[in-house]
Image (cartoon, rainbow, N blue to C red):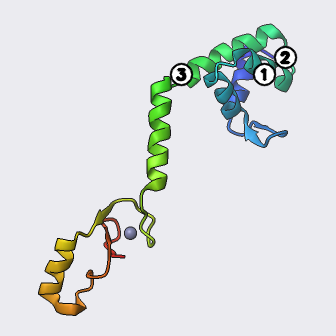
Amino acid sequence: MTAKDVFDKIADYNTINPATNEDVYNELRQLYYAGKEEEAIAYIKDFFECNDFVAENAFKLFKMDAGSPPLPSQVARANAEALASQNKPHCPYCNSTNLHRITTLEKAADTVLFGVYGNTRKCQWHCYNCNSDF
Ligand SMILES: [Zn+2]
């Protein structure tokens, strides 16, 4: 088996590690991005039962394909964005976060225009995605 053969198998989405049920490509990328290159090469060697030379060269091909690891600042920003999106209110109908908070003034205007039956009067949020108020 050549390094190219091994790399082709890594890049194949059907190559799953039966021990973890994870995509081999993803597992290697996690090791690579965490700076654990030796572990990644050992993983390739074990998984594909190849020698050091083939594993190292397959990992080189993999690195070219996977690209450089994200910078710590990029990771921090991605984490912050993920956290912010968890804390954001979601539309209960379509799960969109594209919402607008209905202000007291808008509620008052609605009451003036439509009287006590104004339909957004008791709602706090308007969803721009599905146009519902809740
Ligand atoms: Zn919605």
User: Which callout, 1 or 2, points to the residue nearer the camera?
Assistant: 1
Q: Residue placed at 83% from the left, 40% from the top?
A: 18
Three-letter code for the amino acid on which mark 3 is drawn: Gly
Tell me which numbered mark, 1 or 3, is placed earlier along the sequence.
1
Asked if 86 appears above or below 131 in the picture, the reply is above
Identify residue for label 3. Answer: 67
Q: CA distance from mark 2 to mark 3?
A: 24 Å
Identify residue for label 2. Answer: 50
Give the left or right position of residue 67, taking residue 102 as reference: right
Task: Tell me residue 55's x, y (percent).
Answer: 77, 14
Q: CA distance from mark 1 to mark 3?
A: 18 Å
Asked if one can make out residue 5 in the rendered structure from this viewpoint, the answer is no
User: Which callout, 2 or 3, points to the residue nearer the camera?
Assistant: 3
Quarter of the image for residue 128 reads: bottom left
| Figure quadrant of the C terminus | bottom left
Three-letter code for the amino acid on which mark 2 is drawn: Cys
Q: Residue placed at 12% from the left, 85% from the top?
A: 112
